[in-house]
Image (tube, helix red, strand yellow):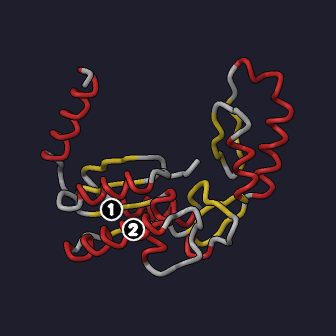
Amino acid sequence: MSALLWKELTELEEMIIGANHPFCLLVGGDRIQTKLSIIKLLLPKVDKIVVGGLVACAFCRAQDHSKCAEIVTEEDVKLAEIVLKEATSLGIPLIISVDVLTLPKELLRQVRSSKLKKITMEHGILQLKQTENQKSNFVSNHALADQATSFLQKHSLRDIPLGWIPIDIGSETVEVFCKELRGSHTVLWTGIIISN
């Protein structure tokens, strides 16, 4: 193990042990089983859990909302059910996304394979970040981002149509998350809240 990794793990352990309460765990990203394992591990230490990204879809499906993101596997759902049951038994509130911005799965695949350095959301518009060697591809990449932006749709997390994938949290979720995080003395944030 490298010295830097050891230092980071030591600092994380000290932060968790010495956390000021209320202690909130903010979880996002698309590595669902990894993030569910982190939540399960930290359940006895936190006061509240706020979840976005595809991890929220696993909890949504675990709560019998079967339309939520077909990308979530049955194994993800089973682990989410276990975590949800443990959180409930410990009296720890688990808050998940309310609404999400989605793209058709096939278009998202094209965007991801476009070799852009980074695609982000700003004010509901997909923004391009390119490396120097991608300048010649700018027009086609820009057109792809424009196309993706035009297809962007807002859905309730519980009502994502088949073939659509969540890529960002919606405005209602932003309000809910801000309200839930307000007043926390410690926030441990793992993973991005958007899924791409």
Q: Is residue 13 above or below residue 82?
A: above
Q: Percent position (x, y) of residue 14?
A: 15, 39
- Looking at the image, which is closer to me, 109 or 145? 109
Task: Determine crowd level at label 1: few under 14, some 14-19, many 20+ residues with C-alpha closer than 10 A.
Answer: many
Which residue shows up at 44% across the image and 56% down it?
32
**Circle 2: residue type:** Ile
> How far apart, in angstroms, are the residues tagged by discs 2 and 1?
6 Å
Disc number placed over residue 85 in the picture, else none: none
> Which residue was labeled with disc 2?
95
Q: How many other residues sit within 10 Å of disc 2, few (<14), some (14-19) or many (≥20)?
A: some
Asked if residue 16 lies left or right of residue 132, the reply is left
In the image, residue 76 lies at what x, y percent? 43, 64
From the top left corner, tell me how far across and down residue 102 is, in percent.
Answer: 66, 60
| Nearest the eye: 99 or 65 | 65
**Left or right, residue 38 beside residue 113:** left
Q: Which residue occupies 19% across, 72% down?
A: 90
Q: Which residue is mark 1?
A: 49
Q: Secondary structure at mark 1?
A: strand
User: Is mark 2 in CB contact (under 8 Å) with mark 1?
Assistant: yes
